[in-house]
Amino acid sequence: MPSSDEPRIVPPNIFGHNRAIVTSQYAIMQTAGTLPSKLPGIENTTIRIQTAPAMGAEFVQIFLEMEPGGGTTRDRDEASQHFFYVLDGHVTITIDGEAHQLDAHGYAYVPVNSHCGFKAESAARMIWIRKPYEAIDLTPPKALVGSRDEVERSRTHTEGRYWQYLLPVDDMAFDMNVNILGFVPGNYFPYIETHIMEHGLFMLEGQGLYLLANEWHEAVVDDFIWMAPYCPQQFYCTGWGEAAYLLYKNVNRDVTFG
Ligand code: UGY
Ligand code: MN
């Protein structure tokens, strides 16, 4: 029971209208409820691990809220590749000793076997994706830095929807794509997708309805969605403005057994 000076109203969205759902096929989660963790070698940063192998994913996606000066205290040199996307603020990403200044919409790809670190130059929010690299008989990709604002919006399929490919999609050395998909209200995919690739999705703008397996869910800016392989999926843009999301996808590798 609350003490007499605590509010007696229970906040909504706990009992009657919980939007956070985790199943074996998908998860949809809101930032505030994804409670913060701490990681060794990272300071003055709130770390919310949105997906990880503990959920069933084969990659890690982390939402970082950094205070000015926050970030890594030592280089990360795991055998993973890393992808950073700055939502707002200014962040310096250092890759093998070379510093890159990223503003909002800036991104960096850090290949396997590289040393990297990050430091906020202002209050900043950033998405951090980590994935073990699946080597094949090609030289692994090199580091890559860019900005969403300079990436072409392709509309190969239709009007009212666009794709931005932040990583090269035709280079088989890459085993992952990170794309931004944008929609005007009322637009949706021409079919329900069901595919072997898994996804990590972060809502950048707007809102919509997301079909995940058999259920439609409301998705709004700052929501996170994980989709397991073969999770049926469809997005229907609602609201008054455009919606856009950042989408991780594993690609370009043969099926493995066991
Ligand atoms: O490329 C994709 O798999 C993408 N169309 N999926 C999605 O947005 N859920
Ligand atoms: Mn898909």
Image: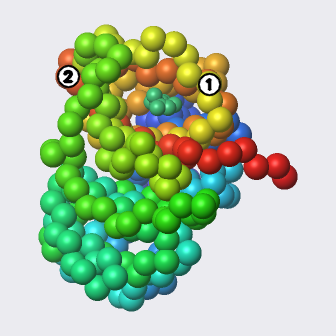
Quadrant in the picture for residue 116: bottom left
* Towards the viewer: 8 or 141: 141
- The image shows residue 21, relative to residue 85, as above or below, that is above
- Marks 2 and 1, Cα distance to the nearest angstrom? 27 Å
Residue under label 2, please give it.
241
Left or right for 119, reference 227: left
- The image shows residue 212, relative to residue 69, as above or below, that is above
Residue lying furthest bottom in this view?
74
Quadrant in the picture for residue 100: bottom left
- The image shows residue 190, relative to residue 207, as above or below, that is above
Amino acid beneath label 2 = Gly
Amino acid beneath label 1 = Thr
* Towards the viewer: 110 or 41: 110
Residue 80 location (% of width, % of height):
53, 69
Residue 153 location (% of width, % of height):
23, 32
* Towards the viewer: 171 or 35: 171
Q: Which label's residue is closer to the chain start, 2 or 1?
A: 1
Residue 107 location (% of width, % of height):
27, 57
Left or right for 156, reference 197: left
Left or right for 196, reference 91: right
Mark 1 lies on a secondary structure that is loop
Q: Residues within 10 Å of mark 2 (few under 14, many from 20)?
A: few
Residue 194: which numbered mark, if any?
A: 1
Q: Is residue 29 visible?
A: no
Which residue is found at the position 36% from the left and 49% from the top?
167
- The image shows residue 153, relative to residue 257, as above or below, that is above
Q: Is residue 73 visible?
A: yes
Residue 33 location (% of width, % of height):
47, 51
